[in-house]
Image (cartoon, rainbow, N blue to C red):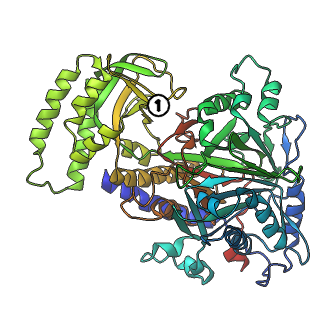
């Protein structure tokens, strides 16, 4: 399977590079390096038109009508700074994003930024007030000729960002040098963990309605389904927002049946987690055709308090620095969103079926012999392909199989899940046993059958998505041996397949490669089927605090680098290390499930346009 995965990865990457490059925008009229230089008329018109959509509530209508030319680009630009002083860091990050990633504005003019997303290290709390963040950002962008219509952000325990690749400006990107993978990337990733830092993403989104909102936990209605939709929207701050289908221009051929009418970007405080499930269910019920994604605010130290930042031009005097609740951004119009989540969890032991359980509690399980045999065959093939050297002290393959067979023989009889977890743990490596003693992870099948690809990695590489959704056990019943998952995370059903999981760095690396190979394979399949191309203009990455250089064995920037290897033409990547990831495992999967909270994972969110707008390229404009 390993050779197959690498072969697919190489083949699909080469197809993607040539395919996406064909859809790059034609070079813009060349300008000077001065920020206040003259820009093309189409770009200036785009900014004027985009500003009218940015933060105003829209009356109910059946279609979101296009008002700007499809040739006007959608633009995402990122900037970062690790300056020790907060004001200096904000100035440097904003300057980098505008001068290196946004189109220049007309001399002495002002252009509009529809949405700014900000993350600020909590380490600045000791030397500066969090209330300084938003005013400093607004002042910095104003000084460089831009006005922000909407801003949301949070404190963080680390940042993810990028900047344009200098090699692209020297024409080396076209050479596609195989000896240096960075040569084919439009931008270079930057990650900073546990250090002072500011990262920003500035978005120009033509024909996209942007409406920010903030809701406290006590204000989220818990009687979902019995409440009038307009009353529910008003309660959470979404009064007036309509998720209308986007009416593409007649000349456009980019309509995709999988497109959603709206997207919701959520930034909750850690204390809001108990109310998050009610908000997610309410959004899905009142906006059924929507994507939901986001991440929970974080801090470097547990002694710091997470902060949320919000600004909207429609109420310029209301600059908010918040400690509780959930920030959100509702987006509708010419925006196409795709999401994926990497769980970083390796399956261990056999495949089981739940024989007794209810709500979020699992009481008894029994071995699924047929499914376990399929998994064992796949595992043996992978071991042979990898040809790993076995230490003399390590148990031989025959002894290991015999021991597992004996354990599985006992597992045919239904028993408490906690007891079975102990049986499985005894047959694992020392590292895996150590993990299971600290945390118990169970994966519940997402639906369908194991089919011809019982291996998680094989399924991901084929574009089929994860077979199991991994949950961490919240509590265990020592008397009856039951386990309970987080409240609202799942509804246990008898007969559901289940596996035990452990987190492991090597498997997480393979999962990322398989996840992105599957993404490219689905994109290639859609292209061959005649569906419109999806050309992402930017990527958000939200890893949790336990995924970083330490988890990936000292490889700083491993996840962001892996993403850009498969998205070489994307000009912007940004995000932050969070306390949890919000989303569905794969937004374009046939098994797509409601959005949930993942306590240890990485979320990838791709922005693009439905109308096939060109990607603004600093390289082409230089």
Q: Is residue 64 above or below residue 509?
A: above
Where residue 343 sits, quadrant-wise, is top left
Q: Residue at x 33, y 40 (%)?
A: 438
Where residue 25 sits, quadrant-wise, is bottom right
Q: Residue at x 75, y 52 (%)?
A: 611
Q: Residue at x 12, y 44 (%)?
A: 397
Query: Between residues 413 and 587, which one lies in front from this camera angle?
Result: 413
Asked if residue 364 can be seen in this view, the reply is yes
Which quarter of the figure is the C terminus placed in? Answer: bottom right
Query: Between residues 397 and 319, which one lies in front from this camera angle?
Result: 319
Q: Residues within 10 Å of mark 1 (few under 14, many from 20)?
A: some
Asked if residue 74 can be seen in this view, the reply is no
Which residue is disc 1 drawn over? 446
Asked if residue 490 lies left or right of residue 93, the reply is: left
Q: Residue at x 45, y 51 (%)?
A: 546
Q: Position of residue 498 (x, y in %)?
A: 37, 28
Q: Is residue 409 above or below residue 110?
A: above
Figure disc tally: 1
Q: Position of residue 453 (x, y in %)?
A: 36, 39
Q: Is residue 111 above or below residue 522?
A: below
Give the SS element for disc 1. Answer: loop
Q: Position of residue 147 (x, y in %)?
A: 85, 63
Q: Position of residue 100 (x, y in %)?
A: 69, 74
Asked if residue 138 lies left or right of residue 402, the reply is: right
Asked if residue 551 lies left or right of residue 300, the reply is: left
Where residue 452 sits, quadrant-wise, is top left
């Amino acid at each position: 399977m390993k050779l197959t995965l690498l072969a697919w990865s190489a083949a699909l990457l080469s197809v993607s590079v040539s395919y996406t490059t064909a859809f790059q925008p034609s070079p813009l009229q060349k300008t000077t390096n001065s920020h206040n230089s003259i820009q093309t008329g189409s770009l200036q018109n785009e900014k004027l038109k985009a500003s009218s959509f940015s933060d105003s509530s829209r009356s109910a209508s059946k279609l979101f009508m296009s008002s700007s030319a499809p040739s006007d680009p959608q633009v995402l630009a990122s900037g970062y700074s690790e300056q020790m002083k907060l004001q200096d860091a904000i100035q440097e990050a904003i300057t980098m994003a505008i001068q290196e990633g946004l189109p220049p504005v007309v001399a002495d003019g002002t252009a509009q930024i529809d949405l700014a997303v900000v993350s600020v290290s909590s380490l600045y709390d000791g030397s500066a007030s969090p209330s300084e963040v938003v005013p400093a950002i607004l002042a910095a962008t104003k000084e460089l000729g831009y006005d922000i219509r909407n801003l949301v952000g949070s404190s963080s325990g680390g940042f993810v960002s990028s900047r344009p690749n200098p090699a692209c400006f020297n024409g080396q990107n076209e050479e596609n040098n195989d000896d240096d993978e960075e040569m084919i990337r439009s931008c270079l990733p930057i990650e900073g963990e546990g250090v002072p830092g500011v990262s920003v993403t500035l978005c120009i989104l033509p024909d996209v309605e942007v409406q920010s909102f903030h809701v406290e936990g006590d204000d989220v209605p818990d009687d979902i389904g019995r409440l009038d939709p307009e009353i529910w929207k008003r309660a959470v701050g979404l009064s007036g927002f309509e998720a209308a289908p986007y009416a593409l221009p007649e000349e456009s051929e980019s309509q995709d049946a999988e497109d959603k009418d709206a997207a919701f970007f959520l930034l909750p405080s850690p204390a809001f987690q108990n109310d998050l499930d009610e908000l997610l269910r309410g959004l899905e019920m009142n906006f059924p055709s929507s994507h939901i994604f986001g991440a929970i605010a974080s801090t470097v130290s547990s002694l710091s308090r997470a902060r949320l930042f919000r600004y909207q031009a429609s109420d310029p005097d209301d600059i908010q620095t918040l400690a509780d609740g959930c920030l959100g951004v509702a987006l509708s119009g010419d925006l196409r969103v795709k999401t994926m989540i990497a769980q970083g969890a390796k399956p261990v032991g056999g495949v089981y079926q739940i024989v007794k359980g209810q709500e979020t509690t699992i009481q008894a399980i029994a071995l699924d012999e047929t499914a376990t045999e399929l998994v064992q065959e796949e595992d043996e093939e992978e071991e042979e392909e990898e040809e790993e050297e076995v230490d003399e002290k390590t148990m031989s393959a025959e002894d290991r199989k015999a021991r597992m067979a004996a354990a599985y023989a006992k597992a045919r009889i239904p028993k408490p899940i906690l007891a079975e977890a102990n049986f499985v743990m005894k047959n694992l490596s020392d590292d895996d046993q150590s993990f299971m003693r600290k945390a118990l992870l169970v994966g519940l099948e997402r639906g369908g059958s194991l089919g011809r690809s019982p291996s998680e990695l094989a399924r991901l590489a084929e574009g089929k998505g994860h077979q199991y959704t991994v949950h961490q056990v919240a509590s265990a019943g020592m008397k009856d041996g039951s386990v309970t998952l987080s409240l609202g995370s799942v509804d246990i059903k008898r007969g559901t397949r289940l596996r035990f999981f452990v987190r492991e760095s090597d498997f997480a690396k393979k999962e990322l490669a398989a996840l992105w190979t599957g993404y490219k394979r689905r994109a290639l399949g859609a292209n061959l089927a005649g569906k419109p191309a999806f050309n992402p203009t930017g990527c958000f990455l939200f890893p949790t605090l336990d995924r970083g250089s330490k988890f990936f064995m000292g490889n700083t920037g491993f996840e962001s680098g892996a993403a850009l290897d498969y998205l070489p033409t994307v000009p912007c990547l940004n995000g932050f290390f969070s306390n949890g990831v919000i989303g569905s495992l794969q937004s374009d999967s046939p098994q797509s499930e409601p959005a949930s909270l993942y306590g240890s994972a990485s979320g990838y969110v791709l922005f693009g346009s439905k109308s096939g707008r060109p990607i603004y390229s600093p390289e082409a404009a230089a």
